[in-house]
Amino acid sequence: MRRVVLLSSAAVVLPGSARNPIARQHRAVESALEESGLSWTFIRPGMFATNTLWWWSRPIRNGAAVRLPYPEAMTAPVSERDMAALAVTALTEPGHGRQAYTVYGPQALTLREQVEHIGAALGRRIPIEEVTPEQARAELSEVMPAMGVEAIMGAWAAGTTAAPETSTIVEKLTGRPAQTFAAWARDHAADFRA
């Protein structure tokens, strides 16, 4: 049987997904695959660790402060390496057909802690400047579409009042621990250098 793995989004299982344009787009593709007759597996990650490259690489490379609306907001970033490992597992091992795996990073970290991990990987302190949500929204809109901006701002705002979910699905399915954000930052240190 032919197998397909779809990189979907955790947005499809979150409350309010019917009103979320990102969730609706991903769910439409999932539905098509469910009806296709293929053996499908959906990988539904939450916040990507690589998103920090969009948001923070320019100021970090320029030696400027990272501007955050909610420095103490928590997220659980998931590594692209872990998403790829799940996809390989689903494609090469039996038992993953017609399964949907929601995957979050292995630990909840504040945005401040994430910037600190990047700083540690670079061997220097990265300043943080707190900005208003409106300022952050305007700055994010320079690097991503409005739909993404609203999703990120919503996730950050939610992370100020509740700890995000973490998951162990990577280790459970691949047999190796998920990559921590600190390890991800070390692997991507060159992406943040001038």
Image: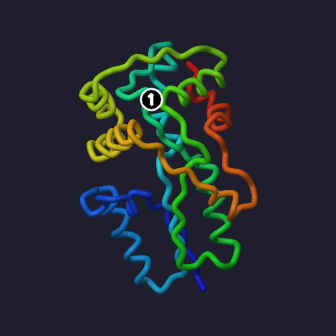
Residue indicated by mark 1 = 72
Residue extending farthest to the front is: 161
Q: Vertical placement of 127 versus 10: above or below?
A: above
Q: Quadrant of residue 70?
A: top left
- Residue 27 point in image, percent of width and height: 36, 67
Figure quadrant of the N terminus: bottom right
Q: Quadrant of residue 186?
A: top right
Q: Vertical placement of 44 versus 28: above or below?
A: above
Q: Amino acid at mark 1?
A: Glu
- Residue 107 point in image, percent of width and height: 59, 43
* Residue at image point 58% right, 29% down: 191
* Residue at image point 65% right, 79% down: 95
Figure quadrant of the C terminus: top right
Q: Vertical placement of 3 versus 25: above or below?
A: below
* Residue at image point 24% right, 28% down: 134
Relative depth, front residue between 32 and 14 = 14
Left or right placement of residue 62 versus residue 67 in this view? right
Count of picture labels: 1
- Residue 125 point in image, percent of width and height: 58, 14
- Residue 137 point in image, percent of width and height: 28, 32
- What colour scheme has been applied to the protein in the rendered image? rainbow
Q: Residues within 10 Å of mark 1 (few under 14, many from 20)?
A: some
* Residue at image point 58% right, 77% down: 3
Secondary structure of the residue carrying tag 1 is loop
Residue extending farthest to the right is: 175
Relative depth, front residue between 127 and 142 = 127
